[in-house]
Image (spheres, rainbow, N blue to C red):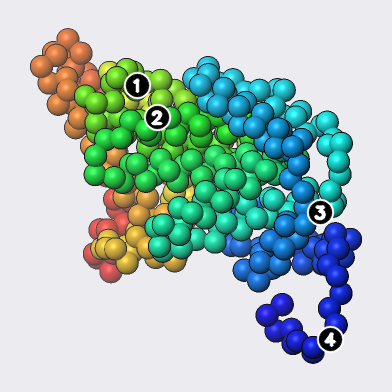
């Protein structure tokens, strides 16, 4: 649109009907999903759509529904520890408004929300402002489309961003738990619409695991809010299991990630049983090799950020190999004074297991390259 020339012609009055024609000519043929990273409309198109929005009346009926939606969200967040969601909320938009605006209203707010979510900025204030705008537009979209999965998922991701900011801060902030409850509220509503979304289940599992690590870091302060971290770990476990059975993204699934995270969770939930987590770490290591992981002789920052998928898989293999040995050492240290648990047979079993690890391709590749 920025390439159009002004010919000084008499302008036509912009009506909703004309705006509708322009909107459907400029909007993406397929509405973008929340998980994309690129804006599907330009800043010029967004500016024009803002003019269209100013022509739409946000009446009392719409505002009442928006307030009702926010009330439902607040209630759901307060009871989300039981994993509840509001069935009434999902069917809120089934009842049409008495006053109908332009047809394009049903997608306009979603496109704004998607644009502000993905526009990105290196400036912290601008970035925070765009996320706030995205949240407001997602809420407005849900007033018209409470069954839109991507709007609920978009709200969930915005809360994830907030959690990450708390985690990277210098000190403990109890507000992180309220944000996680809100994220869980939006997440539960999203999966009640579509439970077969591998990406969202994985993201929810990952952010919850990050939260339990945060609780571990600030153990004394976090105990007042989460007395038992196993609660969060079990949420992670359930989410990873759900993600693993999703069929919407089979070609891009990283099955080794599922095994790796399940091993870490099991290890934390039951510190006295090591055999099951170790087996999962080994299975993950084997899967990485099956996916043609490449094992460079030296690892550096440039290796970890390499564009080569096989090299990145090799970096993950390092993590698996490290976890296998570190978990074994921690287990031995923890049980070193408990002779009843740490028998000679158990020690021999661990020794044979670690000896077997030296024959894995990850370990032998170094010596093979050394003799070349």
Residue found at x 77% / y 57%: 55
Task: Tell me, for residue 177, which label it has, or none.
Answer: 2
Question: Mark 1 or mark 2, which is nearer to you?
Answer: 2
Disc 4 or 3, which lies upstream in sequence?
Answer: 4
Q: Nearer the viewer, residue 143 or 276?
A: 143
* Camera sees residue 30: no
At a point 84% along the width and 86% down the height, the residue shown is 9
Q: Are marks 2 and 3 in contact (CB under 8 Å)?
A: no
The dot on residue 294 is: none
Q: Which residue is mark 3?
A: 104
Q: Dot 2: what SS? A: helix
Q: Tag 3 or tag 2, which sits nearer the N-term? A: 3
Q: Earlier in the sequence, mark 1 or mark 2?
A: 2
Report the Cα–Cα distance between label 4 and label 2. 58 Å
Quarter the N terminus occupies? bottom right
Closer-to-camera residue (346/173): 173
What kind of element bears circle 4?
Answer: loop
């Amino acid at each position: 649109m920025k390439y159009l020339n002004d010919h000084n012609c008499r302008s036509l009055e912009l009506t909703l009907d004309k705006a509708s024609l322009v909107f459907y000519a400029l909007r993406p043929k397929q509405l973008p999903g929340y998980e994309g990273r690129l804006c599907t409309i330009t800043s010029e198109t967004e500016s024009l759509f803002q003019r269209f929005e100013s022509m739409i009346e946000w009446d009392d009926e719409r505002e009442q529904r928006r307030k009702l939606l926010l009330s439902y969200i607040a209630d759901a967040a307060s009871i989300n520890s039981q994993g509840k969601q509001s069935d009434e909320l999902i069917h809120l938009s089934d009842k049409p408004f008495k006053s109908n605006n332009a047809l394009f209203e049903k997608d306009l707010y979603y496109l704004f929300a998607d644009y502000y979510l993905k526009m990105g900025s290196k400036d912290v204030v601008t970035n925070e402002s765009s996320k706030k705008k995205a949240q407001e537009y997602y809420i407005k979209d849900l007033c018209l489309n409470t069954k839109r999965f991507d709007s609920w998922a978009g709200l969930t991701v915005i809360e994830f961003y907030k959690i990450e900011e708390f985690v990277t801060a210098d000190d403990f902030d109890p507000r992180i738990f309220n944000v996680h409850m809100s994220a869980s509220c939006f997440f539960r509503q999203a999966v009640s619409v579509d439970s077969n979304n591998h990406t969202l289940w994985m993201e929810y599992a990952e952010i919850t695991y990050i939260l339990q690590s945060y609780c571990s870091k600030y153990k004394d302060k976090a105990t007042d809010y989460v007395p038992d971290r196993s609660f969060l770990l079990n949420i992670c476990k359930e989410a990873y299991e759900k993600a693993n059975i999703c069929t919407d993204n089979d070609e891009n699934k990283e099955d080794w990630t599922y095994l790796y995270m399940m091993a870490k969770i099991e290890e934390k939930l039951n510190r006295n049983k090591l055999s099951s987590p170790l087996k999962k770490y080994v299975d993950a290591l084997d899967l990485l090799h099956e996916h043609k992981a490449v094992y460079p002789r030296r690892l550096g920052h440039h290796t970890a950020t390499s564009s080569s998928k096989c090299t990145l898989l090799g970096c993950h293999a390092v993590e698996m190999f490290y976890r296998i040995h570190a978990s074994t050492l921690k287990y031995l240290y923890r049980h070193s004074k408990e002779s009843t648990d740490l028998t000679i047979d158990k020690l021999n079993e661990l020794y044979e297991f670690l000896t077997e690890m030296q024959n894995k391709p990850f370990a032998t590749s170094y010596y093979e390259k050394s003799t070349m």
